[in-house]
Amino acid sequence: MDAKAVRAAATLKRRGPAGVSSRMIETTMPSTVTTHRAASAHITLVFAAVALLFTWALQLPAVLVKWGVLDGPIERFVPLAGLGGFGPLVAAVCCARFERGGEGIRGLFRRFLIWRVGVRWYAIALGLLPANYVLGVAVYRAIGGNTTLPWFFPPETAAHVAALLIVPVVEEVGWRGYALPRLQQRYTPFVASLWLGVVWALYHVMMSVLQNVPPGAFAIGLADVFVGSVLFSWIYNHTRGSLLIAVLAHVSAHLNNPAHAIPDATALAIQTTALIVLACVLLFADRKLWHTRIETRELTPAT
């Protein structure tokens, strides 16, 4: 083989033949890909630690007052506990600012501009969770359950409305805007969803303690959040990583929120059971999605 042929072969090895995807090309450079994925996993661990520590640190004083460890009216610490809910947003902004080779804060919020995803995904984002609970109640009544159980739990107080408007944004910028795409650089969407579901559930622990959630409802609520991560990942990956759609899906969880019935956990248990069934359907019906590693650049359209 002459020198020209050798150079041509080397160029083809570096670039890959026409039509080969970036995912396939990357397999010719395993050390680079492995390093990149390890870095993504590392920064995601930093994000999770910052988000949880920020949230727990600001909510802990109110919990300690509740337990009698600290003196003073608990109302004094409620605003601080509310600020603790901003943990995912704060962590995402901090990590995006200092992440080497990342898109930065502007890239983080650019995902709100991904809105051309088809009308059906807006309908799915806003309607799937509420409809899934209604279907669960219908099945529950059909098998002899309590026929007086409400079909809907809309926001009824100022606190509920505030949660509907604020919580989806401050959480989703962190969970789906920052953490999920980086987890998916190292893991398949299924595994990434499980990891994120654990962190998302842990995030709710301190607030559940503060709200006097009974042990049974506490466990069901954490399971609900954990399984919900699968649904949110499914929506996220089918809408090219749209943060707008992820926020709308989170809004829908507050439009019909059975957690409002606590300490009675029946409605929440029905929702969680229906969500588990839905997650299983999505995992089976969309098997290719869950077992194919998705790079961030494959989700975000060119700008």
Image (tube, grey):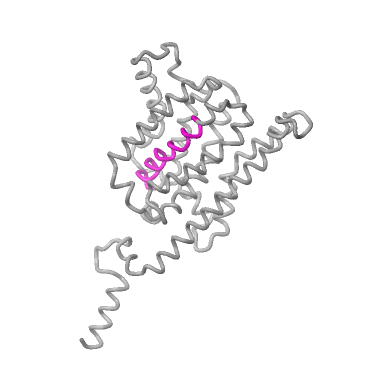
User: In the rendered image of this protein, does residue 154 appear above or below residue 21?
Assistant: above
Residue placed furthest toward the front: 215
- Secondary structure predominantly adopted by residues drawn in magenta: helix
What range of the chain is rendered magenta?
Answer: 220-240
Q: Quadrant of residue 25?
A: bottom left
Q: In the visual, does 7 lie left or right of 262?
A: left
Where does the image place residue 290, in percent across and percent down from the top left? 33, 46
Q: In the visual, does 244 lie left or right of 124?
A: right
User: In the rendered image of this protein, does residue 83 appear above or below residue 95?
Assistant: above
Front residue of this view, candidates 126 and 182: 182
Residue placed furthest toward the bottom: 2
Q: Residue at x 37, y 15 (%)?
A: 141
**Is 7 contained in the magenta span?**
no
Q: Residue at x 58, y 22 (%)?
A: 157
Q: Quadrant of the C terminus?
A: bottom left
Q: Residue at x 74, y 30 (%)?
A: 68
Where does the image place residue 22, in percent across and percent down from the top left? 32, 62
Where does the image place residue 44, in percent across and percent down from the top left? 51, 53
User: In the rendered image of this protein, does residue 185 appear above or below residue 59?
Assistant: below
Front residue of this view, candidates 297 and 289: 289
User: In the rendered image of this protein, does residue 153 appear above or below residue 16?
Assistant: above
Q: Quadrant of the N terminus?
A: bottom left
Q: Quadrant of residue 296?
A: bottom left
Where does the image place residue 156, in percent across and percent down from the top left? 55, 20
Q: Residue at x 62, y 28 (%)?
A: 211
Residue placed furthest toward the left: 1
Tag count: 0
Residue placed furthest toward the top: 148
**Is 236 contained in the magenta span?**
yes
